[in-house]
Image: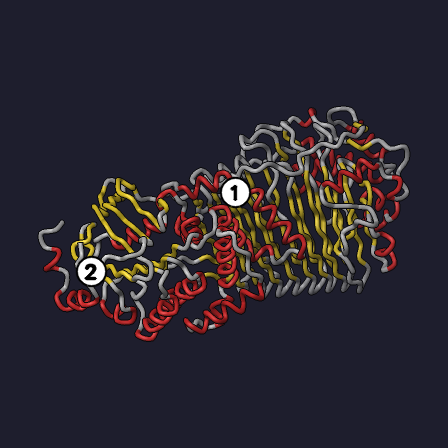
């Protein structure tokens, strides 16, 4: 990201508060549903971060020497880096020595099958609505369940293997498919891309690995469910998805964490590679614990996600629904290298209470006739601060490139903020770049109109917000769209004020 | 008050000496009005007389200061009810400027609203199939094209389409008390005829109407029982249908002078 020069910033228009607002208020203060803690014995690395901790993580995972060297090199670089300060969020400096970098539920041996997985873990996922057991599994969705620093189970593996699809935890991929990991790891997000990606490269623990062979259309949704459970730990997962020539995959991730008074750091790196004619659709429903209504606790979600459209006519589509986390800092991006490749970014980001989000995307057009679409919907309520930051860069080589960006902000109440920082860099004459932005407040007029037709203020707000987000929700797989709509309703509770 | 016949039944709406301010400014200043079941009342009057304030205040819009006076709807204190409860009890306002709600399909909105009203009255909700049957029937009445049902609520509708859409909702909800706030403004002759058709389809011995307008031409389609002139927040003259025609000829000056 370039350093920001402030662009037009919208602060909420002042309007007389109304009874509708009082109703919105109560709507916006419902409790976080996934805030429970699983009582399970954990194996923790010693507190803090140094080379020995990295060696310990690497040996716990039985990693080859090259990977340990890669981690140590990343760590050395990280030590010399400083955290970014350009983002439009505020938080006290993080003490990196006060966290645990490895936490794993205690088991005798690695479970060979689901029957050997600790029932407490299975129960946890069941409670989160992601049952892993054969009889209760989500139909048509294969799940990799990551609990703190380790993957505890991956479903439907054998069915996928029949088609040559590899879907496993990152740790297993390092053991079973080292050549693929070594070839692609860090190839999209370089170690030193940014402060948090360097940290992740040094200490990443687990995550998911996907490889779709040439010409294969993945028959089911692949998904990873991330759960932070242990206190004072950071979660640093690493996800790598490779879609070979002419393949197609749709991948989803969900995230939750217990309610805790301390802030916890989640610094993930996700890398996607799409070869010729391949399509990757990556959807996120992010519901990390957002902190309480006074801003105490919550997850710092500092994530680097990037996809490379390496091949001709390849396509990478990001859809994100960001409702959780105390602070969100993420810019799922596309490098459009292959001619006629396509990048898409659909985002709903909601900040309520004291939540802060600085999120958006980067579309880097390098290949000819590359196309990108950005649809960003920011909703701010309570004292929430919501920033869209997006870069569209058309390189000299990208003749005939096209981009369309639309950034809409919706304000609920008088104390929140919406900010838009678009960076458009066009170095090629034949390119067409369009940017549209709107800021609106849930109007008293709209609320009154709905209430005059018999809807309560809550129903009215939820209806208006759903309408606002529709362009993004329709990009989500069906059952997740329903989930996202519900989640938005819950996250908005108590916002009308 | 008027020379008109006193209604025999318990009034549907009973407004007694109502005073309402916007901020410090008095808008309604001692308004008294009774609407009995089956009756249609028209309110006319010069700009700024308080006509739209009356309709919005009765529908429960925020931002008005209730200074004194009472409003009873079917014997209940209307002013303690939130807007949605008034709607569920059968109070409907056809807006002069209907609001746009992008992203929400018109038909979906109407079904959600109708079912919220039915829930509020303890009635069973309509399923999608029954609703479609119902909306088709009402749609014929207002001649709103299919495309308007699929599009977002009022989003990109012309002025006339918005008014037809209000009429469609009125026909659908079958309110006990329908208030029309300058529904005729910006409508062509055909659309005026549609308003008349919808109102006639709803008129019966139980339902009441409060029609706010500047012009006699809408009233010729509606045939109100009573016509009132509102000026400076008070009803200064009441009469029958002929009063509207008189106003059309003479204007308001002869009534308003020396009032405010």
Q: Residue at x 82, y 43 (%)?
A: A153
Q: Is residue B63 left or right of residue A281?
A: left
Q: Which residue is found at the position 13% from the left and 55% from the top?
A: B256
Using the image as rendered, state which of residue B55 and residue A152 is in the foreground: B55
Q: Which mark is residue A34?
A: none
Name the side, left or right, on which A163 lies relative to A348. right
Q: Is residue B248 above or below residue A263?
A: below
Q: Which chain is mark 2 on? A: B
Kindly identify the residue that appears in the image at 21 percent across and 46 percent down.
B30
SS assignment at label 1: strand
Query: Which dot, 1 or 2, sits closer to the camera?
Result: 2
* Displayed quadrant of residue A277: bottom right
Query: Residue A491's spot in the image, x, y percent?
Result: 57, 42
Q: Where residue A112 appears, x then y in whole percent?
A: 90, 42
Instruction: Note whether A141 is above or below A108 in the view shown.
Output: below
Is residue A146 visible in the rendered image? The answer is yes
* Residue on which disc 2 sits: B4
Secondary structure under badge 2? loop
**Which of the colour schemes (rainbow, by chain, secondary structure, one colour) is used?**
secondary structure
Label 2 near label 1: C-beta < 8 Å?
A: no
Alpha-carbon distance for marks 1 and 2? 61 Å
Q: Say which mark, if any, is on residue A386.
A: 1
- Can residue B97 be seen here? The reply is no
Q: Position of residue A472 (x, y in %)?
A: 58, 55
- Residue A373 drawn above or below residue A238: below
Crowding at label 1, few (<14), some or many (≥20) Cα neighbours within 10 Å? many
Instruction: Indicate the quadrant containing the N terminus of chain A: top left, top right, bottom left or bottom right.
Output: top right
Instruction: Between residue B209 and residue A496, name the one nearer to us.
Output: B209
Residue located farthest toward the bottom when viewing the structure as drawn: B190
């Amino acid at each position: 990201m370039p350093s920001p020069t402030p662009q037009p910033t919208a602060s909420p228009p002042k309007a007389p508060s109304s009874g509708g607002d009082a109703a919105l208020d109560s709507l916006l203060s419902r409790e976080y549903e996934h805030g429970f803690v699983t009582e399970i014995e954990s194996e923790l690395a010693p507190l803090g971060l140094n080379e020995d901790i990295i060696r310990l993580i690497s040996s716990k995972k039985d990693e080859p020497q090259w990977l340990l060297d890669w981690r140590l090199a990343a760590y050395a670089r990280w030590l010399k880096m400083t955290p970014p300060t350009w983002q439009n969020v505020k938080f006290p400096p993080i003490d990196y020595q006060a966290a645990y970098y490895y936490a794993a539920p205690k088991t005798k041996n690695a479970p060979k099958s689901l029957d050997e997985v600790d029932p407490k873990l299975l129960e946890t996922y069941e409670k989160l609505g992601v049952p892993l057991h054969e009889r209760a599994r989500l139909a048509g969705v294969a799940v990799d369940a990551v609990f703190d620093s380790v993957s505890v189970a991956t479903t439907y593996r054998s069915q996928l293997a029949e088609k040559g699809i590899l879907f496993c935890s990152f740790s297993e991929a390092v053991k079973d498919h080292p050549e693929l990991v070594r070839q692609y790891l860090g190839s999209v997000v370089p170690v030193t891309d940014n402060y948090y990606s360097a940290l992740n490269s040094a200490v990443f623990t687990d995550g998911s690995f996907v490889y779709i062979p040439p010409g294969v259309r993945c028959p089911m949704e692949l998904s990873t469910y991330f759960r932070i459970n242990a206190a004072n730990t950071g979660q640093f997962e690493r996800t790598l998805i490779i879609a070979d020539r002419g393949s197609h995959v749709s991948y989803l991730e969900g995230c939750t964490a217990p309610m805790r008074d301390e802030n916890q750091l989640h610094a993930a790196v996700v890398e996607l590679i799409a070869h010729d004619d391949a399509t990757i659709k990556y959807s996120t429903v992010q519901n990390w614990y957002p902190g309480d209504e006074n801003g105490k606790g919550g997850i710092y979600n500092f994530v680097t996600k990037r996809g490379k459209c390496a091949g001709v006519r390849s396509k990478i589509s990001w859809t994100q629904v960001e409702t959780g986390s105390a602070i969100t800092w993420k810019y799922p991006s596309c490098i459009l290298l292959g001619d006629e490749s396509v990048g898409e970014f659909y985002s709903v980001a909601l900040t309520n209470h004291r939540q802060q989000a600085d999120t958006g995307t980067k579309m880097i057009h390098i290949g000819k006739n590359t196309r990108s679409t950005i649809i960003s919907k920011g909703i701010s309520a309570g004292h929430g601060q919501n920033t869209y930051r997006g870069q569209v860069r058309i390189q000299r080589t990208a003749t005939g490139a096209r981009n369309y960006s639309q950034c809409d902000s919706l304000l609920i109440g008088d104390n929140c903020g919406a900010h838009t920082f678009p960076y458009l860099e066009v170095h090629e004459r034949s390119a067409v770049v369009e940017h549209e932005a709107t800021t609106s407040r849930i109007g008293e007029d709209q609320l009154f109109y709905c209430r005059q037709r018999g809807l309560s203020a809550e129903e009215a707000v939820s209806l208006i917000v759903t309408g606002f987000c529709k362009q993004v929700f329709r990009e989500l797989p069906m059952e997740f769209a329903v989930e996202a709509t519900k989640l938005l309703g819950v996250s908005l509770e108590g916002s009308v004020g | 008050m008027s020379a008109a016949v006193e209604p025999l039944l318990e009034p549907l709406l009973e407004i007694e000496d109502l005073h309402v301010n916007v901020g410090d400014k008095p808008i309604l200043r001692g308004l008294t009005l009774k609407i009995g079941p089956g009756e249609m009342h028209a309110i006319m009057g010069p700009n700024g007389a308080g006509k739209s304030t009356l309709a919005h205040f009765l529908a429960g819009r925020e931002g008005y200061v209730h200074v004194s006076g009472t409003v009873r709807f079917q014997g209940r204190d209307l002013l303690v009810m939130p807007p949605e409860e008034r709607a569920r009890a059968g109070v409907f306002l056809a807006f002069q400027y209907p609001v746009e709600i992008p992203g929400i399909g018109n038909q979906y909105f109407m079904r959600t609203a109708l079912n919220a009203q039915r829930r509020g009255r303890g009635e069973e909700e309509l399923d999608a199939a029954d609703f479609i049957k119902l909306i088709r029937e009402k749609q014929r009445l207002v001649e709103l094209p299919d495309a308007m049902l699929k599009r977002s609520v009022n989003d990109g509708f012309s002025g006339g389409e918005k008014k037809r859409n209000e009429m469609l909702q009125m026909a659908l909800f079958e309110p006990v008390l329908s208030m029309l706030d300058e529904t005729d403004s910006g409508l062509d002759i055909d659309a005026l005829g549609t308003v008349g058709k919808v109102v006639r389809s709803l008129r019966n011995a139980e339902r009441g109407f409060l029609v706010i307008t500047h012009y006699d031409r809408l009233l010729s389609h509606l045939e109100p029982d009573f016509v009132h002139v509102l000026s400076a927040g008070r009803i200064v003259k009441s009469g029958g249908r002929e009063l509207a025609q008189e106003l059309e000829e003479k204007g308001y000056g002869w009534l308003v002078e020396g009032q405010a």
